[in-house]
Image: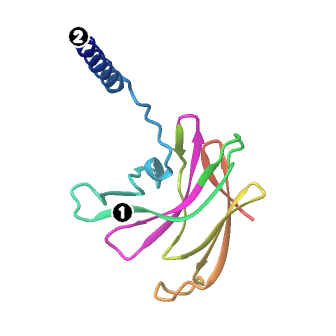
Amino acid sequence: MKKFILLFALILVLIAGWLWFKKSTPVATVINDPKNIAYEIEGESIPLKDGSYETEAAPDSVEIVTTEYFGNDVTGDFNNDGTQDAAFILTQGGGGTGVFYYLVVALKTADGYVGTNGLAFGDRVAPQSTEWRNDEIILNYADRKPDETFSVDPSVGVSKYFQVQGRQLVEIKK
């Protein structure tokens, strides 16, 4: 009977020690989700949480500016460091009728992802596809003719080309 009690006590001590060790061992915080990091848009830091971010349009304003993950993801080694990065579209809108579209890149590092600047490519456009070809991110979307109002549906095909230089996303004019 004494052996059973000693064995039981030893098991309890081992379990308690394991629980204490697990609780006191720090867990590394590595952000491996591009929808949960910050990007720079129009000079402002936009820290996404689950692909979304809201802020006041101006101090003490009731108008809210919402930035959201749109999609059209493409992956590739955009900065030639041997790791797969991700590019996708964010939208940003406030109290008005405009919905502005931005291309952003999440660069993969040893510590997780780092966001680039976002480059605007249109207001109320219709994104079609995003590709990675010949070391360029190619963004295809429909826009309006220069003389058309926003009440006209986008119907003109546009392709824009981008590269990552350092940690900055830049448009390549073709």
How far from the left and from the top, in percent, is residue 19? Answer: 31, 25
Q: Which label lies toward us, 2 or 1?
A: 2
- Secondary structure of residue under mark 1: strand
Q: Nearer the viewer, residue 16 or 97?
A: 16
Q: Is residue 54 left or right of residue 91?
A: left
Q: Amino acid at mark 2?
A: Lys
How far from the left and from the top, in percent, is residue 156? Answer: 63, 83
Provide the residue designation for mark 1: 66
Q: Residue at the spot x=26%, y=12% of the render? A: 6
How far from the left and from the top, in percent, is residue 41? Answer: 47, 55
- Secondary structure of residue under mark 2: helix
User: Where does the magenta region start and end?
Assistant: 87-111
At label 2, counting other C-alpha atoms closer than 10 Å, the crowd grade (few under 14, some 14-19, many 20 or more) is few
Q: Residue at the spot x=42%, y=62% of the render? A: 68
Looking at the rendered structure, which numbered label has been put on residue 166?
none
Assign the magenta stretch its main secondary structure.
strand
Q: Is residue 132 left or right of residue 167?
A: right
Looking at the rendered structure, which numbered label has been put on residue 2?
2
Q: Residue at the spot x=41%, y=74% of the render? A: 98
Placement of the C terminus among the 4 image quadrants: bottom right
Q: Is residue 131 left or right of residue 104?
A: right
Asked if 79 appears above or below 147 in the picture, the reply is above
Determine the image quadrant of residue 104: bottom right
Q: Nearer the viewer, residue 138 or 143?
A: 138
